[in-house]
Amino acid sequence: MQSQNSSAVSKKEEKGRNIQVVVRCRPFNATERKLSAFNVVDCEHARKEVTIRTGGVGDKATKKTYTFDMVFGPTAKQIDVYRSVVCPILDEVIMGYNCTIFAYGQTGTGKTFTMEGERSAGEQFTWEEDPLAGIIPRTLHQIFEKLSENGTEFSVKVSLLEIYNEELIDLLSPSPDVNEKLQMFDDPRNKRGVVIKGLEEITVHNKDEVYQILERGAAKRKTAATLMNAYSSRSHSVFSTTIHMKETTVDGEELVKIGKLNLVDLAGSENIGRSGAVDKRAREAGSINQSLLTLGRVIKALVERTPHVPYRESKLTRILQDSLGGRTKTSIIATISPASINMEETLSTLDYAHRAKNILNKPEVNQKLTKRALIKEYTEEIERLKRDLAAAREKNGVFLSPENYDAMSSKITTQEEIISELTERILLAEEELKRVSELFTDSKKDLEQCASDLHQREEELVLTISDLKETKQKLSEENFIVSALQSNEEELYGTASRLLSTVNISTQDVTGLHAKLDRKMEVEQHNVKMQDCFSKQMDCLFNQIKTSVDEQSIKQKEMLDGYTCEIDNILNANARILRTTVETVTESFGNIKVIVRSETIRGVDELIKQQSLCQEAKKELLERVEQYKTDMEVKITEKMLPSFGAILELSNQLKVLFQKNYALADKMKSVKEEMNLFFSEHKESLAKIHEEATSAFTSLQDKHDSLKQNISKTSSQHTQAVTQVISCLQNQLNLLAVDTQKNINSLLTEMGDIQTSADSDKQCLVNHCVAEVENTAAQESRFASAAEKLVDDLQQLDSEGVQAAEETTGYCTYLRNNFKDLQHETSEWCGAAHGHAEFFADSQFKFLEEYRSLVQNLQQ
């Protein structure tokens, strides 16, 4: 398993490598401090994280965090960035790789400072040891030191290219014309590379020449002051360093190893409104932003792995084509500002950089050239230059006008770009086809392998099933045999156990039998002895018993005589006691009869007394009810009758009001019927007008069509007659002309009659419409007057209804107060009646309790 994982990791490393992205945040500058900007960027060098506080000064919870390969804060020095980022890349360049480092970010965030650096004041340091020196001088210095230490033969060539307004300019050209434009072509040896025609490559012999070259290029580079940067770069610069190193193989063959390092200083993206760029500077900013936008689209397309990547939409992306998604090892240094006023641009830069992390390059070591191949390449180049020189001296080449030459050059360039793009598409299609073919082949192989495995597994499954059946059969047989053996074994075991127990029992029985026989013999002997002794003792005892019986018979006789006397005495005493008891019972029965009679008489008296109490309570309760009835009648007569009279009066008023409403409703109904009648008549008249107009226009259209047909027919007849008459006599022509004129005059007369009829119908229609309009206006005035009168009646009824409602409210209030008083008095009377009832119930309960106790005493 571990071996598989390691092989997968090695394959992934061989397949591709992500672009390294580094973020560097510069310190605050004077402009930002003057504008009172606050810090929104936190750089964690150890955790490789950049955190942006997007919520403002007070809100520290709203954050956005990005993770990169390396992060450098505002306190980081030039040497720290160089050692962490560039030193490992420089070793790979010397190993023969193509490497690219480019700085990307907003204008004024330190891209040029990071790439080129500055000179310290006082010139107390050499350029390569200056702490403010950037990546380019430090890189060339270290290249010479490393190659010199290795002791190998090498040569270093440098070029400095500027991309200004989508034009290529050589900054190291010896020509005094600083605006000389260069042309770019696809490299035939590298499908993703380009060749800059006429680009000057200067051989650097030692590190002291480097600074002069840098100063020479910096003097020609386009810079200008903006509100955001006093020395803002207005172009992109590409500093390329090509190293040729000689190696000797084991066989003694000399090879040339080539490594290339591109250091790109991009112009910063800028907001024209904030940078203050106008006119020429604004056009420069537009061109810069356009190329950076294309770079962003290329990054997005590479990350999303779309089939088409827009490399050719910008010169910058075309030059960086091999660095983005190609065979080059690439690192991006994203520079940002910590100030809150630049937070938008900072977030945009970090988003682009974070997205670029996912771009996958496939680095490859450059092919090593033999000395012979390199000499052959140089020889071919010299021959080509000689031919061009000879043609220029002899003037035997092709001469064209500048306009034709420019047109031909632009056409060739366009065709080359189209051919390159089509070639790229073909290559992509071929790669896709190859990938699909490989995938199909692999899938087919996998399918065949799976099919063979499946067939093999099916055969194994069939064998396994047959083995399983046989095994199950054997297992069932063995189980049957085992169960039979077990049953037999259990039976034998049971039989043996029973035999053993029988043997044990038999042995115990035999032992007991012998012991019993021994005991029996001893008992028989003892019995014989005891029998003799017992016979002797029995004789003695019989004699004694006989003597005792005689004595006892005498004693019993004497006792029986005594008992007879005692029983006679007891019977006499019992007879006397019985007579005394009968007399006592008779006397007690008479006393009980007297007590019962007296208690009964007392209970009857109590009941009569209780009945009288009930009669008195009933009489009192009836008097109270009668008094309450009288009071209620008086109160209803005094208080309720006026209220009911008022309610009856209010009811009469409401009845009158409802009658008026009914009259008003009848009036509304009559108005509605009149309006319905008017609108129905109006609708019928309009329908009649519509029908008349339709029929009139239909007849006019029919007459017009017939006239048109007659005219066309007459014209055709005239044409035919003219054709015939041309070949005949002239007098017939005149006669035909007269007939034609007559026909036309008759037709014109008929058309005039039709026009007169149409005018009369139109006038009639207009008159009818005017009459209907006047009728409608009259009906509208009548409806308006009726509506006004209806509104007045409704308003009067509303006022009367409001007055009646107010009177009803007053009567209802009076009636509610009377009912409240009546309710209060009823509650008081109910309370008194309830207390009287409770008193009566208590007296009844007391009487019943006394009566119950009396009955209990009577029972006792």
Image (cartoon, rainbow, N blue to C red):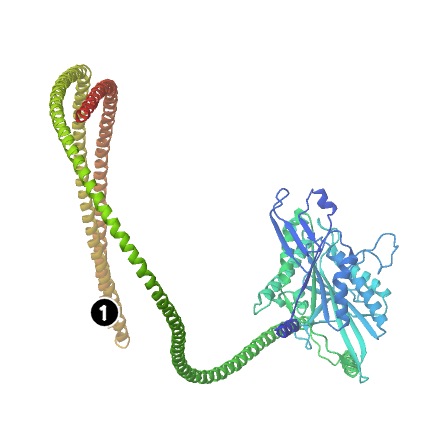
Answer left or right for 538 relative to 608.
right
Q: Nearer the viewer, residue 128 or 730?
A: 128
Query: Horizontally, is 318 left or right of 433 in the view?
Result: right
Is 86 located above or below residue 244 in the figure?
Answer: above
Among the 4 quarters of the image, the one containing residue 96: bottom right
| Residue 10 at x, y percent in the picture | 66, 73
Front position in the image: 715 or 171? 171
Specify few, some or many for label 1: CA neighbours under 10 Å numbering under 14, 14-19, or 20 or more. Answer: few
Residue 676 x, y percent position in the rendering: 18, 40
**Quadrant in the rendering for residue 712:** bottom left
Give the vertical position of 556 relative to 856 (above or below).
below
Q: Is residue 543 visible?
A: yes
Q: Which image quadrant for residue 7?
A: bottom right
Q: x%, y% of residue 289?
A: 64, 57
Viewport quadrant of the N terminus: bottom right
Q: Nearer the viewer, residue 680 or 5?
A: 5
Query: Residue 270, can we see it?
Result: no
Q: Is residue 662 above or below residue 518?
A: above
Q: What residue did someone put label 1 on?
A: 735
Q: Please tell me whether mark 1 sits on a helix, a strand or a loop.
A: helix
Q: How many marks?
A: 1
Residue at 85% across, 70% down: 149
Q: Position of residue 70 (x, y in %)?
A: 70, 59
Q: Is residue 297 left or right of residue 31?
A: left
Q: Which amino acid does the dot numbered 1 rest on?
A: Leu
Q: Quadrant of the C terminus?
A: top left
